[in-house]
Amino acid sequence: MKPQFDNKVMSSFYLWFDHTLTRKGEAFVNHSGFFYPVDTYHNGYYTYASAFRPLVADKSIPNATIMSGVYVDSGDGLKFAATGENDGVNDYGFSGINYDQGELYFTRDISSGSYSGISGDFAIKEFSIHLTDESDEDLLVETKFHRKPRIQESITGLAKDTVTYPAIFIRNDGSHNDPLSFGGVDQTTIDIRAIIFAESQFQLDATCSLLRDTRYETVPLMSEANMPFNGFGDFRNGEKYDYRNFATGQNHPGSGQFYVEDVIVRRFPRRMMERSAIVDLNPDIYFAVADFELTQIRRPRT
């Protein structure tokens, strides 16, 4: 089935939300680190993972280090390799960077022989952001979160099934159409909830304040065909991702925009959480939700 309006809204909202949090909140830190072999064999590619994720991919974020390649130490010094590079001498089979998962993909196993390490320079997002269909209760009571490491804590990469916090989960909470004028014009309203898991009161206050103040902003609506990432989580067609260009329609045909009609932030007192089952599973998490009401005037039956 081809993507419908709601699919486009959720994908576009995700990119806008991530850009807003990372740029306005400066919610990232620049870092240098190693990548380690992991058991995941992704569609015929050897996988090497960082101890940190996700990585910033948006080059419009001021002062953020966007990874464009890696350093491979094959025994005769560090050699820089860009994605898809094959110069006939230093062919490491480096095929892609998955910024969301903090992973590298190679066509061959370079961790054998004289290999002694893969490293890179990158920016780590303060929050990982996920699209979800889980309820608040399932996320709070039934999900075990692991604090995102701030420093290199072990010589290993993060496994794919490791759920780290700080994190924000975005969920479609329903939608409806209301007639607006003759000729089949409706106003479509979509409710989206952002479920915030922070590691400190300061971080939670800052995030809630930033999200509340996005009321009355407009969000570019982009088609699935023009999303910036491919199936590996790397740039599509090698084109560097700059959200500002996507937001202004410079890199894709205009698909309109939707309007942030309202944002309501709900806080949960720490003492309430301490008396619940939440404290048994995730005792150090600070929790809030932000409810967004998005609208767009459209002709849904044409």
Image (tube, rainbow, N blue to C red):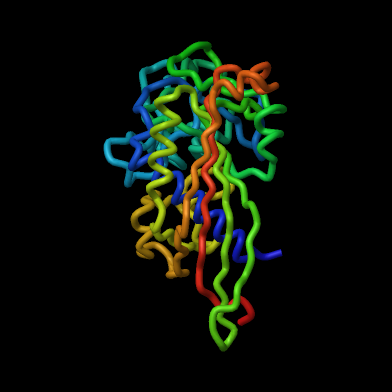
Residue 3 lies, in percent from the top left, at 63, 63
Q: Of 3 and 202, which appears nearest the observer?
A: 202
State the residue at coordinates (37%, 26%).
Answer: 79
Q: Of 189 and 242, which appears nearest the observer?
A: 189
Residue 46 lies, in percent from the top left, at 60, 31
Q: Of 157 and 106, which appears nearest the observer?
A: 157
Residue 165 lies, in percent from the top left, at 54, 26
- For the N terminus, the quadrant is bottom right
- For the C terminus, the quadrant is bottom right
Q: Give the left or right position of residue 169, taking residue 75 as reference.
A: right
State the residue at coordinates (44%, 38%).
Answer: 208
In this picture, is 49 found above or below 171?
above
Q: Is residue 157 visible?
A: no
In this picture, is 151 found above or below 49?
above
State the residue at coordinates (50%, 68%).
Answer: 296
Count the marks: how many? 0
